[in-house]
Image (cartoon, helix red, strand yellow):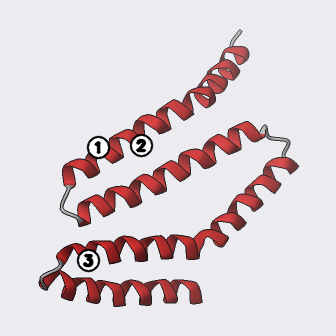
Amino acid sequence: MEDLFAIIGLALVTTILVVFIKESKIPALGMVISVFVGAVIFIQILPKISYVVSAFEELATRASINTFYLTTIFKIIGISYIAEFGAQVCRDAGQGAIATKVEFSAKILVMVLAVPIIGAILESVVRLLP
């Protein structure tokens, strides 16, 4: 919980700072600060992400689930979060069209990664049919 308050505090201070900087003669500096703080927040939360990944890996091992599928799901989640971050940075810079392309690219990458999982599901369904 303390982590969340620290992140929100950093975000609020940065937001106020960026608003003042954007009104000054160097609005590009606001964008740089915004991206930098976004990266700091991401780095700050990495240990929590690592904990979640470890917990799911342990559960998958106990359930004898093929780690290929779990790894693929983690990649899909990672692509989604990183693409969302990138798209928001683009939107903050006033580049909505580029943000849309980032999101579209992420959707294609997710679809490509999902193909083996969908194939395994279809194969299982076919085996169940008489």
The residue lying at 55 percent from left, 34 percent from top is: 113
Residue shown at the point (22%, 64%) measured from the top left: 93
Q: How crowded is mark 1: few (under 14 residues within 10 Å), some or many (20 or more)?
A: few
**Disc 1: which residue:** 101
User: Picture coordinates of residue 9 (x, y %)?
Assistant: 43, 90
Mark-to-mark CA distance, 3 and 2: 28 Å
Relative horizontal placement of residue 109, taking residue 98 as reference (left or right): right
Label drawn at residue 29: 3
Horizontal side of 24 relative to 80 (left or right) equals left
Name the residue beneath numbered marker 2. Answer: 106
Helix, strand or loop status at disc 3: helix
Q: Which residue is drawn at 39% across and 83% down?
A: 11
The earlier-in-sequence mark between 3 and 2 is 3
Dot 1: element: helix
Q: Please identify the residue farthest to the top as the structure is shown.
A: 130
Residue 115's place in the image compared with 89, above or below, is above
Q: Quadrant of the N terminus?
A: bottom right
- Above or below: residue 126 compared with residue 27: above
